[in-house]
Image (spheres, helix red, strand yellow):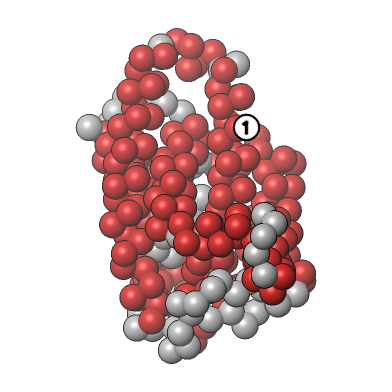
Amino acid sequence: MAAFLLGTVQGLTEFLPVSSSGHLVLTRAALPEAAVRTPGALFGIVVHLATLAAALIALRREVAAIVAALLPGRPSGERQAGRRVAVMLVVASFPAALAGFLLAEPIRGLFEAPQFASLGLVLTGCALLGCRGLLGSRRSSRGPLSGPARYRDALLIGTAQAVAILPGVSRSGATILTARARGLAAGDAARFSFLLSAPVIGGAVVFELAHAFGDPALAELGVGTVALELALGFVAAFLAGTLALAWVFGWLAQRRFHQFGWYCLASGGVGIGLSGA
């Protein structure tokens, strides 16, 4: 049940600017020590994979449009637009890929540090409240996805995603804020942000699974225990993520996204207090 609870927490917080990784770290710390025995980094990656699946299903039209644009037989204008979005996604993925390659080991240790995750939540809350003007837009973005206008914009959004590898720093909050600052409409910023999670999560899954095969701690736990915890977490995160996605765009349109900053400040402050105690 603890694995299902953690998966639910991941699903509900992944698409909101409240840092799902920070919530996973704090929730694990609040549970009994043996409640979930799978290492935090591996469990976090698998439940992130579940919410990625939920996002790709919800954005299936955008995904299909990008894939179709890369195939022959479509008008050149549509093909070029789709290819441009695909290229921008690749460019924006570079910073997080580089950070993950160079800093994988230190970052893995932070997923066992509730004090650091709490501090990250406080910083996220400050960013959301300080940049509240960027988190709402009355411009419609229901048409074809419009990505960043320039490579520099894509790299800046990708850099925000790289920073959000740290637990407690909201990936969706950082990337949506940066995309809005670079001129994307709120809905386009959210759609680009969620699609951008695909390469970094996919790469992290491959890396963590390769690391897991050589981890003696996982061998001691047994394949059955680890597989059951990961399966429960995956199912819960997928269902909760599908539900949360239905809320995100409405909150952006209503200019209420920044209000999660107060929640981040409160939860981060409580986490720091409990960690100190």
Question: 249 or 265, which is in the foreground?
Answer: 249
Question: 176 or 188, which is in the foreground?
Answer: 188
Q: Secondary structure at mark 1?
A: helix
Residue 54 image point, x, y percent: 39, 50
Residue 184 image point, x, y percent: 58, 79
Q: Is residue 49 above or below residue 191?
A: above
- Asked if one can make out residue 267 in the rendered structure from this viewpoint, the answer is no
- Decide if residue 81 is on the left or right side of residue 138: right
Q: Amino acid at mark 1?
A: Phe
Q: Is residue 207 above or below residue 95?
A: above
Residue 90 image point, x, y percent: 70, 56
- Which residue is drawn at the image coordinates 65% and 79% (left, top)? 182
- Which residue is drawn at the image coordinates 29% and 50% (left, top)? 240
Question: 17 or 201, which is in the foreground?
Answer: 201
Q: Is residue 115 above or below residue 246?
A: above
Q: Residues within 10 Å of mark 1 (few under 14, many from 20)?
A: some
Question: 202 or 178, which is in the foreground?
Answer: 202
Which residue bears the numbered disc 1? 207
- The image quarter containing residue 33 is top left
